[in-house]
Amino acid sequence: MAPSQPPPSKNRPPPKLKRLPPHAHISKRPLLHPAIPSPYTSASQKKILYISARTPFISAVKRIRKLLSLIDEREVGQIDLAGGKSGRNGKGSERQKLGKKAGKEEVFLKGTGRAIEKVLGLALFFEGQEDVKVRVGTGSVGVVDDIVEGDRPEKGEEQEEGGGQGNMDVDREEENEEDEELPETQIRKASFVEVAISLR
């Protein structure tokens, strides 16, 4: 019997990126993400804060607290002191019931690269708070980088540096690599951390 091949694994590492010639370099693009919704929008829109390595810690804590307080106000709804029905058109209690069934609204923090440490620091800070719950998740995202070609060294300069016959084969390999057309972009994987913070 012929040995059977194992099924392809979903968790196999991505293929290695091609080595760039010496006259080319990579220019990193900023990460793409959707527009940030207003903090006053309904629970149907995710409240996301993108944290960078330069985001001040206390400013991020204040922004998260503000979003959590707005979420809390939305969940409580309007209170009518006259004893009538709460909310507009008497539907306040129905909305509150639906909100409790649907689950708590969360504030999401996201960070990649050097910002992962800051995001985890914020998660640890809020983990110590008694009135909030914290969930941490990780993943990877595809990032697009541009490949920029510089000036190619002239043929005469390469021969002066090479000097001997032993380098002829190496020079031919380099010429073949140079003749290949470089792609304009390449995709690499970057790790990210996502922290979800919600009120208890």
Image: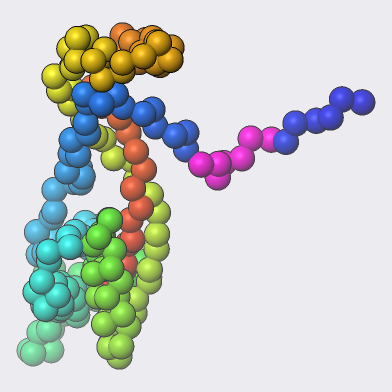
Q: Nearer the viewer, residue 103 or 69?
A: 69
What is the basis of the colouring in this image? rainbow
Quadrant in the picture for the C terminus: bottom left
Which residue is pictured at 47% across the width and 33% down the height?
Answer: 15
Residue at left offset 18%, top offset 39%: 29
As drawn, 113 above or below 104: above
Q: Is residue 166 left or right of residue 151?
A: right
Kindly tell me whether residue 181 is visible in this rendering: no
x and y percentages locating residue 37 in the rendered image: 13, 55
Q: Quadrant of residue 62?
A: bottom left
Residue 150 percent coordinates (x, y): 15, 23
Q: Taking the image as drawn, is residue 189 in sight? A: yes
Query: In which image quadrant can residue 86 be found?
Result: bottom left
Give percent across and percent down for residue 78: 12, 78
Q: Is residue 62 left or right of residue 121?
A: left
Q: Is residue 182 left or right of residue 6?
A: left
Asked if 154 appears above or below 142 in the picture, the reply is: above
Question: As drawn, which residue projects farthest toward the right?
Answer: 1
20 sits to left or right of 146: right
Taking the spot 30% from the left edge, 88% from the top edge, the residue there is 128
Q: Quadrant of the N terminus?
A: top right
Q: Measured from the top left, where is residue 50 in percent x and y? A: 19, 59
Report the number of numbered marks: 0
Q: Residue at x 55, y 41 (%)?
A: 12
> Which residue occupies the foreground of this view, 106 or 93?
106
Seen from the viewer's position, the closer of residues 67 and 63 is 63
Q: Magenta part of the protein: which range? A: 7-13
The magenta stretch spans residue 118: no
Prevailing secondary structure of the magenta residues: loop
